[in-house]
Amino acid sequence: MDDSAFHLFLLDSARKPLACGRLHFNAPEEAQVRFMAVDENARGRGYGRRILEGLEAEATRRGAQKLVLNARDNVTEFYAKHDYEVIGEAETL
């Protein structure tokens, strides 16, 4: 799926990665944020928001009507601040 994935990186002036994200399409109308990360030392500066906004913009540009993602419990608050809602929870085995 790498060939069809959209990758977005935010680098500092020394070209060190600060944040990144990856977008895939599950169907022509549904995109999925497959991966997002922000460097531990760069958190709280809005970089995650900028990556998410960039991925959302690319999904819209490519015609997505719906954007989905899977998130760990420790970041659901981040996505909730950006108008995402939990629609299911993983079960523990």
Image (spheres, helix red, strand yellow):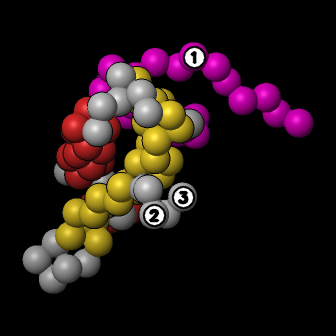
Q: Does residue 32 show up?
A: no
Residue interval drawn in magenta = 71-93
Looking at the image, which is closer to me, 40 or 11?
A: 11
Residue on which disc 3 sits = 1
Residue 16 in magenta stretch: no
Tell me the mark number nearer the camera, choosing from 1 and 2. Answer: 2
Vertical placement of 5 versus 28: above or below? below
* Residues under numbered marks 2 and 3 in contact, where contact means CB atoms less than 8 Å apart: yes
Marks 1 and 2, how far apart in space?
29 Å
In the figure, 1 relative to 79: above or below?
below
The residue at which mark 2 appears reads as: 3
Q: Residue at x 44, y 56 (%)?
A: 4
Mark 2 belongs to which amino acid? Asp
| Category of crowding for the residue at label 3, using alpha-carbon neighbours closer than 10 angstroms: few (below 14), some (14–19), many (at least 20) | few
Q: What residue is shown at x 53% (from left), y 20% (from top)?
A: 86
Does residue 11 lie above or below 70 as drawn? Answer: below
**Of the residues under marks 3 and 1, which one precedes in the sequence?**
3
